[in-house]
Amino acid sequence: MPEWQPAQLVAAHDETATARSLVFDIPGWPGHLAGQHVDVRVTAPDGYTASREYSIASGEVDAAPSGLGASGVNVELSVEELDDGEVSPYLVRGLDIGDHLEIRGPVGGYFVWTAAQTEPVQLIAGGSGVVPLMSMLRTHAAAGHPSPMRLLYSVRGPQFAFYTDELRRLVDSSKGSLTVDYAFTREAPSGADRSIGRLMRDELEMLTVPVASSPTTYLCGPNSFVEGISGWLVELGHPASRILTERFGGA
Ligand SMILES: Cc1cc2nc3c(=O)[nH]c(=O)nc-3n(C[C@H](O)[C@H](O)[C@H](O)COP(=O)(O)OP(=O)(O)OC[C@H]3O[C@@H](n4cnc5c(N)ncnc54)[C@H](O)[C@@H]3O)c2cc1C
């Protein structure tokens, strides 16, 4: 397990009214792959500590060849505030530029995408589950990767969606290799061609890379979302071994 490292907040911006992206400078960061996460530890003035896991939103960063860590590299996380949460409200509203906390990572070698992969990729996000998938999209775009990568993003409404402008730009400059579809569950923009509501099995078939194209699927979100969607994907004929999942917790 990697050691805890001091991390300084060097930039931040709101993603939505309840979510914030945080950019940390972590001296000696060893690099990471798209899809990995970190442990974040915060310490109260009385010494009480709490730690939670957060996915890395920034694209892949190579380790420095010397093994001393990548220098001048920032790591971005995006955090959704839970009303009754212990750590997320502090990360979204309590942390100022220049503040420090501790980060340990990167963690996880299973839920990753690398540019060496040539098969079509289907990304499916529920809410803040889009964060590690954004790392994959950014890595794909930075590599100018030619193989298709498609994101299906289930979110309450447009005002709750992360990375909206950047996703549009990535799609526009991808020469057709990136596609983004939204499934708004409670509120949709006027003129939307899909009615609001949760993703359903038949729709999943229409909005995802077909089984015949042998995609790898990366699925991330709350427990119940991941359970439901992964079950339907298997029913639709996707081999379970090609469906990689990351669960953020919750109902
Ligand atoms: C691998 C991994 C990566 C993650 N990446 C991200 C990320 O990129 N961005 C992000 O915002 N969160 C992410 N999470 C969730 C994050 O770790 C915390 O669980 C979340 O921020 C809540 O922490 P908290 O201390 O505010 O709430 P807590 O005090 O831990 O919990 C408060 C209440 O919320 C419930 N709860 C806990 N987690 C969730 C959840 N995810 N959804 C709904 N209800 C929940 C609890 O059961 C409890 O009732 C990730 C989780 C995992 C396991």
Image (spheres, grey):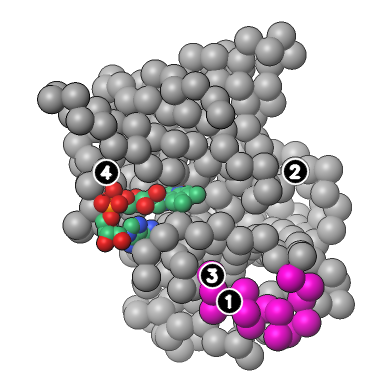
Disc with the residue nearer the chain's start (4 vs 1): 4
Which residue is rendered at x = 60% and y = 87% of the image? 201
Which residue is label 1 attached to? 229
Residue 100 vs 33, above or below: the answer is above
CB atoms at circles 3 and 2 under 8 Å apart? Answer: no
Query: Disc 4 marks which residue?
Result: 87
Give the vertical position of 73 relative to 188 (above or below). Answer: above
Left or right: where 73 falls relative to 89: right
Indicate which disc, 3 or 2, sits on the residue closer to the N terminus: 2
Mark 4, other Cα within 10 Å: few <14 / some 14–19 / many ≥20: some
Callout 2 amino acid: Thr
Give me the C-alpha separation between circle 4 and circle 2.
31 Å
Quadrant showing the C terminus: bottom left
**Amino acid under disc 4:** Val
Q: CA distance from mark 4 to mark 1?
A: 28 Å
Q: Earlier in the sequence, mark 2 or mark 1?
A: 2
From the viewer's side, name the closer residue of 83 and 169. 83
Among the two numbered marks 4 and 3 on one chain, the one whose residue lies closer to the N terminus: 4
Q: Tell me, yes or no, whether the highlighted magenta stretch contains residue 230.
A: yes
Q: Circle 2 sits on which residue?
A: 114
Residue at 43% across, 69% down: 155
| Three-letter amino acid code at the position of disc 1 | Ile
Nearer the camera: disc 4 or disc 2: 4
Give 8 or 6, whichever is nearer the viewer: 6
The residue indicated by pointer 3 is 226
Rendering quarter of residue 211: bottom right
Q: Quadrant of residue 185?
A: bottom left
> Mark 3 falls on what kind of element?
helix
- Name which quarter of the figure residue 188 lies in: bottom left
State whether label 4 is within 8 Å of ligand 1. yes
Question: Can the viewer see residue 224 in this picture?
Answer: yes
Q: Which residues are magenta?
A: 226-240
